Image (spheres, coloured by chain):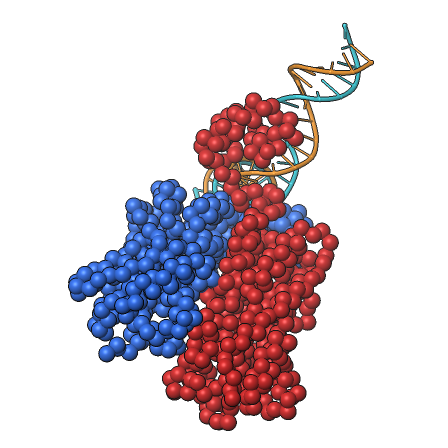
Chain colours: A red, B blue, C orange, D cyan
Amino acid sequence: MSINEIAKYLKVSKSTVSLVINGKAEQGRISKALAKRILDYVEEIGYKPNALAQSLATGKSKTIGLIVENIGDSFFGPIALYIEENLRRYGYQVFYSSTMGDTKISNEILETMIEKKVEGIIISPAVGQLKNIQKIRNKNFPLVVFDRRVIGLSTNYVGTDNYSSSKKAVQHLVDQGFKKIAMITIDSDQPQMTDRLRGYEEVLNDNFLVSFTLKLPYRSNQDKGLGELLSFLHKYPELDALYFSTNYLCVKTLKVLQSIGKSTNYGIAAFDDHELFELYTPNITCIRQPLEAIANEIVKMIISRLNDSIELIEECIIPSELIIRASSKK
Amino acid sequence: MSINEIAKYLKVSKSTVSLVINGKAEQGRISKALAKRILDYVEEIGYKPNALAQSLATGKSKTIGLIVENIGDSFFGPIALYIEENLRRYGYQVFYSSTMGDTKISNEILETMIEKKVEGIIISPAVGQLKNIQKIRNKNFPLVVFDRRVIGLSTNYVGTDNYSSSKKAVQHLVDQGFKKIAMITIDSDQPQMTDRLRGYEEVLNDNFLVSFTLKLPYRSNQDKGLGELLSFLHKYPELDALYFSTNYLCVKTLKVLQSIGKSTNYGIAAFDDHELFELYTPNITCIRQPLEAIANEIVKMIISRLNDSIELIEECIIPSELIIRASSKK
DNA sequence: TTAAATTGCAAAACCGGTTTTGCAATTTAA
DNA sequence: TTAAATTGCAAAACCGGTTTTGCAATTTAA
């Protein structure tokens, strides 16, 4: 049932119906009697306007696009939950897509969402998206980047301080008496990862300790790199602690360690918390990003950009917490 | 830049432009020369059609709605990932929403998605959605229900066999020599939960064992019910095993147990796997639903419904696997 | 050479809305 | 009593597409 059919049935013009339905009877100088007749009929047949047509007419799609690496993981999943719940309160629906780190896919998704006229984009970018993101930023299109920056482009951004948080975690390991601390990270130029690595190297350097770094191939959904991991651990038997740039690398490694029966031989710390860490024996120290707070800031920022007329770029750095769990070495 | 502006600039009609862009130059009998001129210009300015207008005109929004309980959890998160990746290959975008089990919110979301003209709905329904889901099913609207059925309504459905899987898990505990097995579940009429409970009761009954059931209040994102949990365990000190109707209840309980130092005193099994279970000490036996297979079937089914002209209702029951991890009691 | 068929496109109708404009009919003010 | 203002709505223009129809101009067939 369309507004045209309603108009025809009631023998009024569709403009009248539209005005009444949208509570603009007064401003359209529609008589109370006619307004009531229309409202009654609309109610009776349970008419709901076609949102696509409304969007086309008003230029407001009430839709936001969310692009993350993997909505199924323990970082982006909860973030996606909070973002969507929050945006819903503002009347927005959310399109989501997982890139799995693939630049080409990520750019395609970006394009499709823009064609579908999302009003804004929230994205945790893959590497190599500079040009495409720059393009939409240049149009002053509402955009919030989170978790990792786009290198070489200043945008609205929400994230934690990866560098200093990483330092905190590694310093904790040092304070616990570990001397041979390896960092296990992914082979990627994602800025949040390089920042975490920098933090690690800085702390070791400050403490006159040797650094051991393993960069595993970046494919968050695959089991690649397990061989490299084992040979790395085998090559450096002197290691006494492992620091992971992300929680899933830690989990993956724990599985490998368990399979070879070395579970408890290392001091362990990881970036990003995981339900496992609290219950694993021994408990695992980690950096915990406040997921809900991050999501709230993202939503606050995108909503601002939707309403701003002037161009504005904001950064919001949300501190992370060092969750100390492991008992000391000595 | 719209198709109208292109037409105006090239001094042709917009119908001509539309036909050419959509590869229908031949069928519209547009000369090759003109077609090339149009395509060249379209290419030059990087024109992309407004998908909203297209949807309005064609009646195809290329959008699917996904409604789950909590996209941030370890069951729905991966399912959401696979569904979206899969649907993307068919050219569909996905709206998602988490209901957190709230019937009212779930119905509102359903309505909004329909107003936005999604072509189909994939839903893991909250309780009490019978009427609203019935309404859209009666319109022969493409709909796939998963994980839990809508009681009293036959719909397309994808899920596992909760009853028999539950029996397998409980039987395993019995076979391991446990005699006082409690089931910890949620206080909800969700059919997948009642089926799991039935399986538990049946096995205990068949083995002449007493059943102990604790129903915790249903709020998947809260820490309510921990007190009840403790007093339940305190009330029945004779319990030697715990069976959980869902993985997050198990995790929650393990945290409580850990805090009171009783971690390893029970035999444990849970419905749905969790990364923790493989690495926890001792390992935890569970029923593992094949998430990717479930998502694939869901997508296959919704795509079929989108293309079917005839009304068809299918059920797809995907077997779950009993992952045996815990060592035996004796 | 002329009627019929084909070519090549424009124009119109449609999808379903919103918003501005315009115009009788009525009411108010002078 | 008459001009001006207001009331109450319809009509038109617009958002940006798709698809069908229609009609000159050209080409083909008889």
The residue nearer to you, when weighing B302 against B168, is B168
Res A312 seen here: yes
Res B304 seen here: no
The residue nearer to you, when weighing B283 against B322, is B283
Which of the 4 image quadrants contains residue B229? bottom left
Give the x, y percent position of residue B288.
33, 68
Q: Residue at x 68, y 68 (%)?
A: A153
Give the x, y percent position of residue A89.
55, 49
Give the x, y percent position of residue B134.
36, 43
- Image quadrant containing the C terminus of chain B: bottom left
Q: Residue at x 35, y 53 (%)?
A: B188
The residue nearer to you, when weighing A113 against A156, is A156
Above or below A34: residue B109 = below
Above or below A269: residue D5 = above
The image shows a total of numbered marks equal to 0
Q: Is residue A233 left or right of residue B12?
A: left
Q: Residue at x 47, y 68 (%)?
A: A73
Give the x, y percent position of residue A39.
52, 29
Q: Residue at x 48, y 28 (%)?
A: A41
